[in-house]
């Protein structure tokens, strides 16, 4: 398709309405002119590589529905591309708007291309992971040029957004080395950049060649997700100088990207005590001039391995209510193992709950409609209707059916049986006698 | 044991230090004089029936560690008292500070007495449930006197706190009947009181005979948990006139109880959008003069049956951070079925996460210690240490062990394998080369 603009941002700035803007406007119940204005100002992004033909575009921004991302990809411990593709499709079915392909084993390019030719969700990657795999050479032997070439390869493969850890520099290295933090760096990509810089003594290639990266991203309309290499890996490190120092650099890089019409998101923490989350959201908004905030968690405690989808749902809901636009899912296997299919499901549902609860709290138009319909179905004790509005009807139905009430009160469930408040109220309001025994 | 005071509150007001105050002071790291002052002012309670010999007492109040309650009890659909006792003991082992015995089938008194003679957790009940079962007569045939006699029976059985739905009155009946709400009343006890009032035309017995109830509670030191019959059962009903009208009455009843030295907690919502939670906590604090707030949820969306332990963890964490003292657990089976053992576990862990995250956010002394130790263990990749500080070590260990990394990197887990950021950082900081391939 011939098009006379590079990026959605450039189109918006030229006053053009793209098909992607129209789709997003329709989905979000906003006039397309508003979408255009927000895009032009960088207040929202539509990650949409011009080569990702199968994309069903979505917007990411604080005034829009909160989106969720699912991390997948093959690795040394899970090599099967077909299984991974199944996970992708099931994630999209369950409502994930984005898939990050974090593959770190084997021949990664065919899978990446399969994703951008078949998957309707936006596709993100972290090129620095892939660099080691792509060249099949260990980290220390790679050159800055090698890294940039992998960014270009991903852009050519149709990837919609790339995480680039541009904010870590020699000052970060010395801060970390001086032992300022309990958990140092817990970002995989960030640790690779740190290690490469330590081993080679060179400056961060993603920072040094940022202008060249901007040219690539402008050409294909790849949204840059500015990675937070220094996100806190434990509560003790949250909102510290290292984290905020990096955020300041990301704020500067945001301006440089916008000057080239390149779309930008900012990645955020991490492990953060609940009382610091709102401040973190506000800080990102002011320092990065309203660029959409993409958060991993935040996890509100460090002591719940096996349940980090819950600690992340708490933090993610608070974050989204306070301005985060995009939640990266966290599964029960976080900190412990590669997630299996059931973990992926648990992680997605937990993130969807957080996102949805925040959309309601933000008062987005229509956000509560499904809840209101569920309430009506509950009042009527209409179980078929309840499944219709449930986030995961299959699981809900399975729980009820596994333990039905023993007596013939098929209108209730075994939780309360004849003590069901809804049943009692319906009878009382109809003037009927209540039989409980 | 001879004692020259009736309730913990009376003792505090007389300037006495009780053994219970001393234990709570030690657990909470406060001087006992502070505990005494808060008790005297009703800002905290120590639910401790003088006949509950096996009790390991705990305080409930906004300045203390957030406590959690687990609902159990036999019912028509789960009749086995031994299984229920197993659930109780496992709940206490997992850290529940309170058990509410909601038994609604068979001969309930022996189980209740077993609980107060063997269980170290505080025991709560809802006498109105038991009334129907105890007399084996249907609701409409019971008299006000019957209800009050059951309250006395529970006090004599050693119960530490009772939920009484005193705040619902004829005005509530007419508000509900006029169709002001989507979900009417979803409190089981509240619906029974409503139905009884509707069928008999009489005033709420728990309101009408409140002075007599106070005498009973004073005699045994039973803490009154003023029930919220009108808690919202869906987001649409949250913080409405019916709910707040009841809260105003609970505020008046609190003063009457305090005048007789009877300890009081207030029960709270329910289903509440996230943006309304802080306001609900503040409102309870002002209207009920700081009496501890005991919340069920709040659930922040209605559309997640099967996952309501997560919707409740989000709401509970925000509630506790904003002043709630006591969280009633919610299990994945909420709205669907009686919880099984695994549901109970999931519900307890989710509530503990919410409570703990809130304690950290409130800056309670030492609240973050365990998290800091976990972070140290993670940095050292010391897995045995990590299990030591995990909320549910068994589950965490099981997840990691089920999917160990294939290569010989036993220091990492299969989530990242050789890409592990912690491993890379430890090597980089030690000046070692990073091998990833």
Image (cartoon, coloured by chain):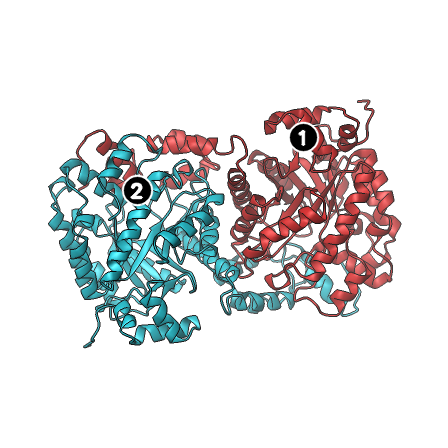
Chain colours: A cyan, B red
The one nearer the camera, B242 or B307, is B242
Provide the chain ID for the residue under circle 2.
B
Residue topped by disc 1: B57
Residue drawn at (68%, 31%) of the image? B118
The one nearer the camera, B424 or A219, is A219
Residue B51 visible, this angle: no
Quarter of the image containing the N terminus of chain A? bottom left
Q: Which mark is residue A50?
A: none
Provide the chain ID for the residue under circle 1.
B
Q: Position of residue B110 (x, y in %)?
A: 75, 38
Quadrant of the rendered structure where residue A114 is?
bottom left
Secondary structure, mark 2, is loop
Crowding near the residue tagged with mark 2, few <14, some 14–19, many ≥20 C-alpha atoms within 10 Å: many
The one nearer the camera, A410 or A369, is A369
Residue drawn at (34%, 54%) of the image? A288
Quadrant of the rendered structure where residue B428 is?
top left
Residue drawn at (33%, 63%) of the image? A42
Residue A16 lies, with reference to residue A160, above or below; the image says below
Secondary structure, mark 1, is loop
Q: Position of residue B418 (x, y in %)?
A: 24, 40
Quarter of the image containing the C terminus of chain A? bottom right
Q: Position of residue A213 (x, y in %)?
A: 18, 56
- Left or right: residue A402 compared with residue A64: right
Q: Which mark is residue B414?
A: 2
Instruction: Check if mark 2's residue and mark 1's residue have beta carbons within 8 Å.
Output: no
Q: Position of residue B59 (x, y in %)?
A: 66, 34
Residue A42 visible, this angle: yes
The one nearer the camera, A358 or B327, is A358
N-term-proximal mark, 2 vs 1: 1
Residue drawn at (43%, 73%) of the image? A30
């Amino acid at each position: 398709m011939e098009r006379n603009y590079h990026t959605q941002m450039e189109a918006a700035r030229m006053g053009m309405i793209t098909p992607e803007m129209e789709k997003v406007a329709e989905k979000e119940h906003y006039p397309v002119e508003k979408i255009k204005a927000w895009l032009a100002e960088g207040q929202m992004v539509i990650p949409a590589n011009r080569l990702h033909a199968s994309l069903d575009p979505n917007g990411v921004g604080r005034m829009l529905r909160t989106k969720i991302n699912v991390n997948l990809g093959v690795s040394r411990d899970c090599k099967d591309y077909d299984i991974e593709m199944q996970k992708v499709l099931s994630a999209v079915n369950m409502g994930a708007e984005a898939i990050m392909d974090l593959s770190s084993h084997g021949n990664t390019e065919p899978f990446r291309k399969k994703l951008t030719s078949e998957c309707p969700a936006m596709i993100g990657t972290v090129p620095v992971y892939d660099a080691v795999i792509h060249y099949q050479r260990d980290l220390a032997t790679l050159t800055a040029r090698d890294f940039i070439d992998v960014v270009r390869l991903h852009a050519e493969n149709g990837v919609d957004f790339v995480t680039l850890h541009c904010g870590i520099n020699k000052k970060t290295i010395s801060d970390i080395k001086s032992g300022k933090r309990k958990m140092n760096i817990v970002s995989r990509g960030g640790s690779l950049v740190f290690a490469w810089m330590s081993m080679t003594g060179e400056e961060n290639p993603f920072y040094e060649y940022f202008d060249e990266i901007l040219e690539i991203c402008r050409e294909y309309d790849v949204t840059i997700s500015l990675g937070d290499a220094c996100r806190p890996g434990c509560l003790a490190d949250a909102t510290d100088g290292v984290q905020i120092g990096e955020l300041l650099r990301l704020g500067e890089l945001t301006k440089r990207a916008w000057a080239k019409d390149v779309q930008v998101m900012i990645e955020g923490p991490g492990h953060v005590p609940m009382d610091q989350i709102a401040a973190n959201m506000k800080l990102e908004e002011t320092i990065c001039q309203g660029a959409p905030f993409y958060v991993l968690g935040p996890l509100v405690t460090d002591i719940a391995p096996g349940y980090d989808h819950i600690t992340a749902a708490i933090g993610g809901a608070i974050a989204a209510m306070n301005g985060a636009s995009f939640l990266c899912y966290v599964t029960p296997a976080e900190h412990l193992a590669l997630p299996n299919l059931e973990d992926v499901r648990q992680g997605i549902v937990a993130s969807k709950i957080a996102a949805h609860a925040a959309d309601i709290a933000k008062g987005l138009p229509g956000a509560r409609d499904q809840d209101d319909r569920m309430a009506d179905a509950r009042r009527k004790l209409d179980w078929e209707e309840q499944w219709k509005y449930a986030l995961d009807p299959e699981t809900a139905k399975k729980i009820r059916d596994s333990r039905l009430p023993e007596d013939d009160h098929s209108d209730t469930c075994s939780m309360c049986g004849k003590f069901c408040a809804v049943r009692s109220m319906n009878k009382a309001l109809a003037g009927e006698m209540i039989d409980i025994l």
